Image (cartoon, rainbow, N blue to C red):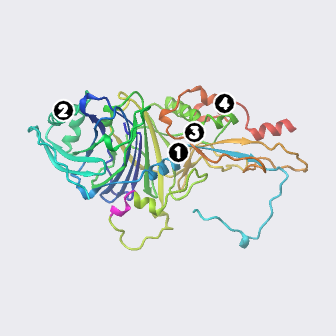
Amino acid sequence: MIRIISMAALTLASAAHAFCGFYVAGGGAELFNNATQVVLMRDGTRTVLSMQNNYQGPPENFAMVIPVPVVLKKENVKTLSKDIFARVDTLSAPRLVEYWEQDPCFIPPRYREEEREYAEDDGDVEKKVEKPKDRGVKIEAQFTVGEYEIVVLSAKDALGLDLWLKENKYKIPEGAEPLFRPYIQQGMKFFVAKVDSKKVLFDKKTGMAALSPLRFHYDSEKFELPVRLGLINAKDKQDLIVNILAKNQRYELANLPNVTIPTNIDLVPSAKSEFPFFYVSLFDRTLKANPRAVVTEYAWQATSCDPCPTTPLSDADFATLGADALPPAKGPVDQYDPKNSFVLTRLHARYDKTSLGEDLVFKAAKPIVGGREFLTDGKSLEQGFREDSWNNFQARYAIRYPWTGPVKCTNPVYGRWGGPPAGEQQAGTKSAQDTAFVERDPAKVEKLAESPIAELQLKGMKPKAGEALRKAKK
């Protein structure tokens, strides 16, 4: 099942199809799609979909089958570098930071307003396919791109498509035929990207292979994510992460419950080595309290971040993801206008074959803030999320080290957090990635959370580090 999906919608007037496919293989091999990243860029009716797949199974020839709304041509398809997918995933992933309490007696120098400086956020051979028996299936296009031998099919009925794939030596998983039906009724085509395993490196221990990312573009109207077809290759629980890039807009689900992940939680020091375990446990506890919900983990301007686990996205990144295939802008574009600012939204769902009975439909949502080092009353950090005029929400967790040095002043000021003191090394911002493969233990939340989590009615292990130290000094 597609695990990570990123979509970039450049306008709000139209909507888009994004597509989850499944694997079929020769010789009756059982194949599983355990990690996929997709970036979908949108402007008007034009969509550019970039997809990176990790495949687990025997090293035989296999293919991805993906529903698409139109017949794709060779000039619409290309391969990409894998770097951009890691950037998007790292930028939006839940993060762990470290803070040290500053000297309570330190008096910051005053600067005249005009002296203050602020950092600026900164040639292929056509592949012939043997003509099958007449099953109502038509080969609309066929070509080769990189290691992919691509065939675009149309079908009159689901049974005919099922038989065509079987007659062409593909073992279709049980239950595939009824899942084809709604897509055929919509008049959709099927993009079959067959891969020659001789051109792909497989890890002998894990059986996993990382394929060259594919990018293709098309024109379509709707804004929904057909995920039911991808359930054919589902193994137990599946993690689906959707990253959406849109101009001045975040998104949430229109047909499923929505919830934001609890954020701004202080963790005990031992969580530094157990952060992924803590996060998946927190995520599971959140879903238990909100059944069938899709969890918002990030909603922030794509060209900035605080803290930053990686550099923000640039104009070159947007071009890699398909800006070169979009219709040109009408007139000059003011890059400082908030309407032209990209917002990156990360949505996370976890389900199995029985808990997800429909495709995902997205809708525009109001801006939210949360998960920042922001004091609501001058003393307390903001908790949860709230609506605002811009998007600044992230899944952010902190380990805090209280001041342990001498306090020689009359009026010490506690609760000022920053970088480490001299001689102390800072690990930097850590992202919780590949959480679908992390051991899960709901008890990790209570063992590692220092501050209370109101949304889950958890008290936390003890008072915040700075507060505990001040109580001990009194």
- Which callout, 3 or 2, points to the residue nearer the camera? 2
Mark 3 element type: loop
In this rendered view, identify the residue nearer to me: 397 or 337: 397
Crowd rating for badge 4 (residues with CA inside 10 Å; few <14, some 14–19, many 20+)? some
Q: Determine which residue is flagged by label 2.
A: 166
Q: Is residue 383 left or right of residue 7?
A: right
Q: Which of 127 and 394 is in front in this view?
A: 127
How far across and how far down the image is residue 464, in percent? Answer: 73, 38
In the picture, residue 137 is in which quadrant? top left
- Residue named by callout 4: 459
Where does the image place residue 96, in percent across and percent down from the top left?
Answer: 62, 43
Q: In this view, does 35 lie above or below 316?
A: above
User: Please, what secondary structure does the residue beneath circle 1 have?
Assistant: loop
What percent of the width, then of the height, locates residue 21?
A: 31, 40
Q: Which of marks 1 and 2 is in front?
A: 2
Mark 1 lies on residue: 93
| Dot 2 crowding, Cα within 10 Å, few <14, some 14–19, many 20+ | some
Q: Which residue is drawn at 61% across and 51% down?
A: 307
Farthest-out residue, front:
198
Which element is circle 4 on? loop
User: Reading the chain from its start, which is encountered first: label 4 or label 2?
Assistant: 2
Q: Distance between the residues labelled 1 and 3?
A: 14 Å
Sequence order check, earlier mark of 1 and 3: 1
> For the residues marked 4 and 3, what is the alpha-carbon distance in whole angstroms?
13 Å
Q: What residue type is labelled 2?
A: Lys
Three-letter residue code for mark 3: Pro
- Mark 3 crowdedness (10 Å alpha carbons): few <14, some 14-19, many ≥20: many
Callouts 1 and 3 close, C-beta under 8 Å: no
